[in-house]
Image (spheres, helix red, strand yellow):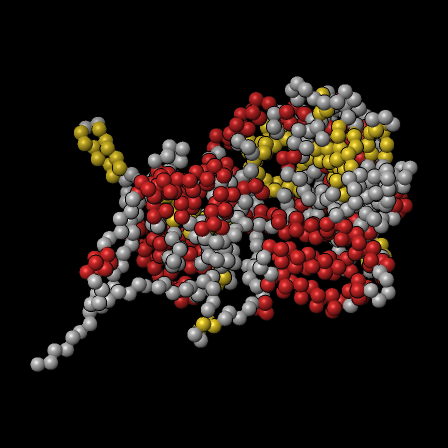
Amino acid sequence: MGMGPGPTCLVDGWRRFLKTGSGSGGVEIDQTEGAAGHSVRAWKTETNRDKHSLSRELENGVAPLRPNGYSCGIPSAPCANMALFLPFQDQHSIDAPLLHALNRIGPLLVAPSNHASHAHQSFIVHADTTSSIEQVTQWLDEGASKVVVGPALAKEIAGKLPPNRLLLVLDAAELSAVSDRLRAAVSGVLLKVPTFNPDLVLSIKAFFADGEIYILPASFTADIREAKAIGATLVIPTSNLTVEQSTNDKINVGDAFVAPLTSDRADHLIPTVVTSFASGRSLGLVYSSVESIKESILTGAGVYQSRTRGRWKKGETSGAIQAVVSIRADCDYDTLEFTVVQTDPGFCHLNRPSCFGPLAGLAALEATLQSRLASAPPGSYTQRLFNDPQFLADKVMEEAKELCLAKTKDDVAFEAADLLYFTLTKCVASGVTLADIEQCLDEKAKRVTRRKGAAKPEFIATPPKVNGKSNKPSAEPYSPIQMRHADLATVSAAQRSALLRRPVLDSKQMIEKARPIVDEVRKRGDAAVLELTALHDKVQLKAPVIHAPFYDPSTGECLDRSGPIDPTVRDAIDKAYANVRKFHEAQVSAPLVVETVPGVICERFTRPIARVGLYVPGGTAILPSSAYMLGIPAQVAGCEEIVLATPPREDGSISPEVMYVAHKVGATAILKAGGAQAIAALAYGTETCPKVDKIFGPGNQWVTAAKMLVQNDTDALVAIDMPAGPSEVLVSQVVPVNFIC
């Protein structure tokens, strides 16, 4: 099976691969002693790498180290479905040359017992039948890009962990048992099949639309190109991979990588973008051939193909050698990206770091500070910063405070630049590079459990006092509701009539006002929800949806920065929960079966709605009562998915009372949005908000209009409880009058 008309496949079946010379391994670069006694990892500082030691290490065939000393894999792991094939470690250990080669080209699928040895490389864990949700969470927190789980575990995890971090493992016979909820809980499927069957793969791809498809045949096959041609990725056991020449039962890892690559050039060369590992900047554009790619994968050296001079190794004559950290193909498999550690004088033949001009921005600042660390003029300001840690710490604190006080866009940018300068000075003085910082950010981004995020006590400002009382923001204790007062003894007849007139809403007019909001969310999903929340609620959110768990019983803290719940309030909610649940449980009845005439049986029975959306108002007051009055019936009925929608507070969090109720009623997700945009997200679904089958709960006129609008849209296929009317409360005070006779 070919890749279609146009580009030419570089190889035709794995048995006809062009063979490359021997050589394997990578590069190991140890710490070196920098100027002024500072220990720095010079291998990531491309301007001061010892090219002779790097050359010797390349010849010795060992792998580059990450800043923490572990063997380096892909610095920022590519999406697993961008891998050209997925190696599966089916052996207790992998020979070092093969492991180094695999680390350069993508993630590795490992068993739970082997994941610890790959903790600082790009890896996917294949859970077994004894694995728990706690173990899956731990593996993701420890850096696994994904975890492969079975159907039983996936059902337990659904709604609790991000779907883009999970894959579902199935046998071909299990496909029919996969529900929509289960399919939505994962980002793709790993299918175990007897043999590679393109027709079966295409049917699976139709079922898992836009999902990642991995195929693991029971018997070894090398149909890598054929699998990629239909949108799937072949899984190959490492016992069938080698750094030696391909055989009938083993394929050379370089051969496997180049199998799906294509070229539209007559010479079959592939454009290759060379990128700096240290700065992320493009260094230049070169070309690669099958042979040069395979040599780079196996040796860890930057080897390319000149259009006029043939194959060449970077630095072989100039001395500006490089070590390959990762090799990735683009989505069309006709362009490559080499991420490399480049030594002086740089990649360009004009002795510059990049063919695209000098460094700029943070990369340029880092290079300047590293140079100053080595040779700052005596008595200079920079030397004082490097030699006086307390002075540098004072400057960092000073600039951080000035950034917090900045108001305008220009002031914020100016103060942020100052803070970045002193922060990077602190990093360079400590031997920390931008690559180290980015690595930490990548590792933190992989975590699925989050810290509470509250500020430390010493950094919490004392709120100003008004009339002698603390004026804390509404994210703390809640601002009082202001009630309007009217004295009927003093108002005019017209004013009295206006006060007693019931509000009348023009539903048609409100529906037309809500329609543009609903349409925006339907078309643009999360992006529209975030923009509308910023516009109407004045809250900037990073993500509109949070998933369970919402409350930590061991600490009494609600998660997602909501903070602790007052024990008295918690006890009151527990008591109300028990009372309301008792009432609704009493309503559960057995099926009613009546034989109206002989042979004619009529039956009435109840079934839970699979997915429900519960709208909890939160504009002027916190209403945990609405949350449990809606959530408990859904919980008692046995609804599989319960999504709460409520407006966020000023700091982007949800009140701890509502978070606690969400925990009590077994909610699976909370949408941080109110108004028409929340109803639209529930009705149509977004990238992160599940689509529901029915929407319940009161709200303002925007909520009511949006509910009426979506229930009549056949694209939404959503029901509502009813259009809620306005709430009215009149408190009448009768003043006693003393009559004197």
Q: Quadrant of the N terminus?
A: top right
Residue at image position (58%, 59%) is 407
**Direction from residue 577 to residue 671 in the image, left or right:** right
Picture mark count: 0
Q: Is residue 559 visible?
A: no
**Direction from residue 627 to residue 559 in the image, left or right:** right
Percent x, y for residue 519? Answer: 43, 38
Q: Quadrant of residue 315?
A: top right
Q: Vertically, is 105 above or below 549?
A: above
Q: Quadrant of the C terminus?
A: bottom left
Question: Which of these two is toward me, 701 or 647?
Answer: 701
Percent x, y for residue 525? Answer: 49, 40
Residue at image position (24%, 36%) is 593
Q: Vertically, is 358 above or below 370?
A: above
Residue at image position (69%, 64%) is 396
Q: Quadrant of residue 693?
A: top left
Q: Residue furthest bottom?
A: 741
Q: Residue furthest left?
A: 741
Question: Which of these two is toward me, 510 or 497?
Answer: 497
Question: Which of these two is toward me, 128 or 56?
Answer: 56
Residue at image position (23%, 60%) is 495
Percent x, y for residue 368? Answer: 80, 54
Q: Is residue 442 visible?
A: yes
Percent x, y for residue 642? Answer: 42, 46
